[in-house]
Amino acid sequence: MPDQKPLGAQISHMLKDRGVDVIFGIPGVHNQEMYRGIEEAGIRHILARHEQGAGFMADGYARASGKPGVAYVITGPGLCNIMTAMGQAYSDSVSMLVLSSCLDETAARRGQLHQMLDQASAADSVCDWSYQANSAEAAYDLIDRAMLEFETVRPRSKHIQVPIAQLEGQAAPAPRRRAGLAEALGSCGVDMRPLAAALSAASKPLFVIGGGAAKAGADLAAVLEACGAACFETYAGRGIVPWDYPLNFGAALARPSSAQIVAQADCVVAIGTELAEVDLWRAHLGHSCPLYRIDIDPECLADMQRAEVAILARAEEAMASLRPLMADSLSQWQVQSVAHQRGLWRAETESERPGIISIIEALRAVVPEDAMIYSDMTQFAYVANEIWPMTRAKHWHHPSGFGTLGYALPAAIGGAVARPGKPTLAIAGDYGFQYSVQELGTAVELGQPLPIILWDNGKLKEIEDSMRSAQIAPNAVIAKNPNFLELARAYGAEASAPETLAQMQEAVTAAFQADRTTLIYLSPNILS
């Protein structure tokens, strides 16, 4: 007879066997059986202060580690609270697995603690899929399905709920992990010769590089060099191709005039990108030539951009196959023209949000090159996403798709947990920071350095600017802020408010060497 344990404990043991070392969450009466096996399985648990924070931590951990981020939450409000983070992970293709309890019976009973009308369907509206496991075997199968899909198809958040009575009931251990299945399913044999011929014949080939191309870096760079292609990066695609590649237009797709550049191309390749609204801020990329799409998501290959050639493949496999087929071409892109255009876009950015570039460049000078950066929805980050030259792929994480506030701090906590001993930085605005400020408690508990850049312009400046642009009198864009320095210190964090750029650099350098979280408060006055 196999070693019987409550199913809640067996799930933790199964996760450990599947490579899960850390779980983020908050225990409650309804999910306490899931906590029975955590320590016994040898899994570290990070206690969040709010389930949304736990979700963002799992998100940040997944982005930094390359492994699934796992969160445990309770029935009802616990699941509702984490749904924002689930939506963000779905948007940004992040491997997040949320496991929750659920009530045993909801149709015939009302008024139960944490009761919802349809919990699984609520979660299903913001994630890849949400299912209830009514047996140990179903729970094990769903967990393995999630883990396999994280490895073989576009990763997105998923939810599994297990009735409380099932979690409490005795169950046999989960079957051991099957080796090699994901690797076998991940192989691809697409014929890349037509694309190689098109690129070699093009006089102005152009690549649009998204975050899904992160593992294709060396081969992708070699292909660009061989055919003399210019490129744009999405925000998530920064750092995949060297920033100083002479024909790199950078992360400027959101600039309206980028459509005029795209229109000059005679062959466009979009690789690992949705070409979504948050990439372009317009309906159409701007091309009139053939568009080749390389992606693992069939939905992207059949979207409104209407690629002439759709290639269902992993970016790294496609580029590895394409590289040896390439022949040198006579590209007509001009290095001087690319540099000039980037200068024009930089001037536009400075004009729209004066002074921020100077602060960002002073900050970048003291941030270690291998730092993992998590930013929130704030003007400081919007500018940085355009002008900060990334030298490593997947080292800047921004909540682009769902566009939630409160992301940076908890996600950075998850990133710091994933990379102990390596630098992690959070960048937040004054308003968004208050969505998850309570996670300062979790950050301090880690006992490791975590600098937080807090940009306080005293208002919802981006919304104010948008209202003025729409000829709406700005309304509800100013809120009373707390004393952020004292608030941070109340949690046990270090805090400082540098008055000059030099003082800011000193504060950031010290924060990366500290033994705890440090809040570094910045305002536009630092430029005066």
Image (cartoon, rainbow, N blue to C red):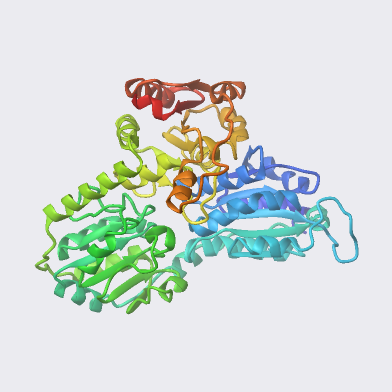
The answer to which image quadrant residue 252 occupies is bottom left
Q: Is residue 271 visible?
A: yes
Q: How many numbered tags mark residues here?
A: 0
Nearer to us in this view, 78 or 38: 78
The x, y position of residue 81, in whole percent, is 67, 49
Q: Vertical placement of 255 versus 305: above or below?
A: above
The x, y position of residue 143, in whole percent, is 63, 60
Q: Is residue 17 visible?
A: no
The x, y position of residue 42, in whole percent, is 63, 41
The x, y position of residue 129, in whole percent, is 62, 65
Nearer to us in this view, 397 or 417: 397
Q: Vertical placement of 463 versus 108: above or below?
A: above
The answer to which image quadrant residue 104 occupies is bottom right
Q: Quadrant of the N terminus?
A: bottom right
> Residue lying farthest left?
330
Residue at point 31%, 49% (across, down): 239
Residue at point 48%, 56% (across, down): 401
Q: Quadrant of the C terminus?
A: top left
Q: Vertical placement of 211 versus 285: above or below?
A: above
Nearer to us in this view, 2 or 137: 137
